[in-house]
Image (tube, grey):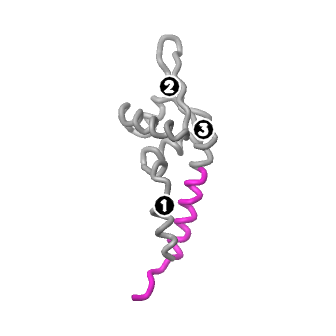
Amino acid sequence: MTALFEELVALDKLIHEPARLAIMTALSACQSADFLFLQRLTGLTKGNLSSHLAKLEDAELITIEKKFIGKKPNTLVALSPAGREAIARHWQQLESLRHNANQWTPPEA
């Protein structure tokens, strides 16, 4: 059952990183979220959140729309169709891995 451990190592590291997993999971529950909401939700600093969003945007997993509401800047973040599929697939993989890990027993020495 080394396949279990190979699957664990092969998880998508772009999504599996804890901060990005939190961002993607939050976005999967809504149509979009603004930057400040994501910052409060995740507890990340502005710079750290911006860095994670840039990586997700570069991978085309999210879209970022910058606009003004009145005179205030507003950044709206949403999952792209590919991002929505990727986070659903990631959680399915984790659930499958959890199930398989519960069934695993170490080989006899």
Residue drawn at point x = 62 percent, y = 47 percent: 85
Q: Is residue 4 above or below residue 57?
A: below
Q: Pointer 1: what residue?
A: 10
Residue drawn at point x = 53 percent, y = 29 percent: 64
Depth check, front residue: 40 or 6: 6
Label at residue 39 = none
Q: Pointer 3: what residue?
A: 80
Residue type pointed to by label 2? Thr
Numbered disc 3: secondary structure:
loop
Numbered disc 1: secondary structure:
loop
Between tags 1 and 2, which lies in front?
A: 1
Q: Quadrant of residue 39?
A: top left
Q: Is residue 78 above or below residue 72?
A: below
- Asked whether the residues under the numbered discs 1 and 2 touch, taking CB atoms below 8 Å apart as contact, a structural biologist would say no
Mark 2 to mark 3 CA distance (whole Å): 15 Å
Question: Mark 3 or mark 2, which is nearer the start of the sequence?
Answer: 2
Question: Mark 1 or mark 3, which is nearer the start of the sequence?
Answer: 1
Residue type pointed to by label 1? Ala
Q: Pointer 2: what residue?
A: 75
Numbered disc 2: secondary structure:
strand
Q: Is residue 108 magenta?
A: yes
Residue 71 in the image: state x and y as whole percent. 48, 11
On screen, residue 46 versus residue 29, left or right, reads left
Mark 3 to mark 1 CA distance (whole Å): 23 Å
- Classified by dominant secondary structure, the portion drawn in magenta counts as helix
Depth check, front residue: 84 or 33: 84
Circle 3 Cα neighbour tier, 10 Å, few/some/many (<14 / 14–19 / ≥20): some
Question: Mark 2 or mark 1, which is nearer the start of the sequence?
Answer: 1
Residue drawn at point x = 46 percent, y = 48 percent: 14
Residue extending furthest toward the bottom: 109
